[in-house]
């Protein structure tokens, strides 16, 4: 089984895939992990993935992005519990069945953390380990059922901005 992908893992426009399988040994992705426009309903085979974007032999950091976008069957992020660093942007957007971010264990995101247009997401639980966001920061937008920012209690540093737009049911900023 593959344990290291030096460039990208792209899973896009695959309408018959349910659970991802075959990535149980994967620990690192050098550049991008994109799961976009698919019927993926489980990320459990990514349970050993620890880092997206890492130092190359030349010691330069690649911008590794995690994009989970428009996956209508995905209800949670269980399977990403070992992922603690993303050296780029994390976008979790337009996942119409996503109820929770639980299963995610991020501590550090070098660039933007974007939570956008996840129709049934009610809180940010699952981000409890997150301590640091780089530039441009945090963007939480257009999540129709978002009630709370619970899950961000350990976040101490945002090097950029915190943007909250179009979350009509947001009750507080705690």
Image (cartoon, rainbow, N blue to C red):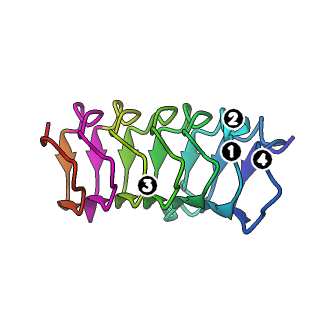
**Label 3, on which residue?**
118
**Label 2, on which residue?**
44
Q: Is residue 16 above or below residue 24?
A: below
**Label 4, on which residue?**
18
Front one among 145 and 60: 145
Q: Is 144 displayed left or right of 55 in the figure? A: left
Residue lying farthest to the right in this orientation: 1
Front one among 55 and 42: 42
Q: Label 4 to label 1, Cα distance in Å? A: 5 Å
In the rendered structure, are the residues bearing label 2 and label 3 in contact, judged by CB atoms less than 8 Å apart?
no
Q: Give the class, few, some or many, for how many residues have Cα within 10 Å of label 1's Cα (few <14, many ≥20).
A: some
Q: Which mark is residue 41?
A: 1
Question: Quarter holding the C terminus?
Answer: top left
Q: In terms of sequence position, does the residue under pointer 4 or pointer 3 come before the other?
A: 4
144 within the magenta span = yes
Q: Give the class, few, some or many, for how many residues have Cα within 10 Å of label 3's Cα (few <14, many ≥20).
A: many
Closer to the camera: disc 2 or disc 3? 3
- Residue 171 visible here: yes
In the rendered structure, are the residues bearing label 4 and label 1 in contact, judged by CB atoms less than 8 Å apart?
yes
Q: Secondary structure at mark 1?
A: loop
């Amino acid at each position: 089984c593959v344990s290291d992908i030096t460039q990208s893992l792209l899973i896009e426009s695959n309408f018959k895939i349910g659970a991802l399988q075959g990535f149980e040994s994967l620990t690192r992705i050098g550049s991008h992990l994109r799961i976009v426009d698919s019927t993926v309903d489980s990320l459990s085979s990514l349970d050993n993935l620890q880092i997206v974007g890492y130092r190359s032999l030349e010691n330069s950091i690649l911008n590794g992005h995690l994009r989970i976008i428009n996956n209508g069957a995905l209800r949670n992020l269980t399977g990403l519990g070992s992922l603690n660093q993303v050296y780029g942007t994390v976008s979790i957007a337009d996942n119409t069945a996503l109820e929770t971010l639980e299963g995610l264990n991020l501590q550090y995101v070098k660039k933007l953390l974007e939570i956008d247009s996840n129709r049934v997401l009610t809180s940010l639980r699952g981000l409890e380990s997150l301590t640091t966001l780089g530039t441009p920061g945090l963007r939480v937008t257009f999540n129709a059922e978002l009630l709370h920012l619970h899950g961000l209690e350990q976040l101490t540093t945002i090097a950029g901005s915190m943007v909250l737009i179009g979350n009509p049911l947001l009750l507080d900023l705690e």
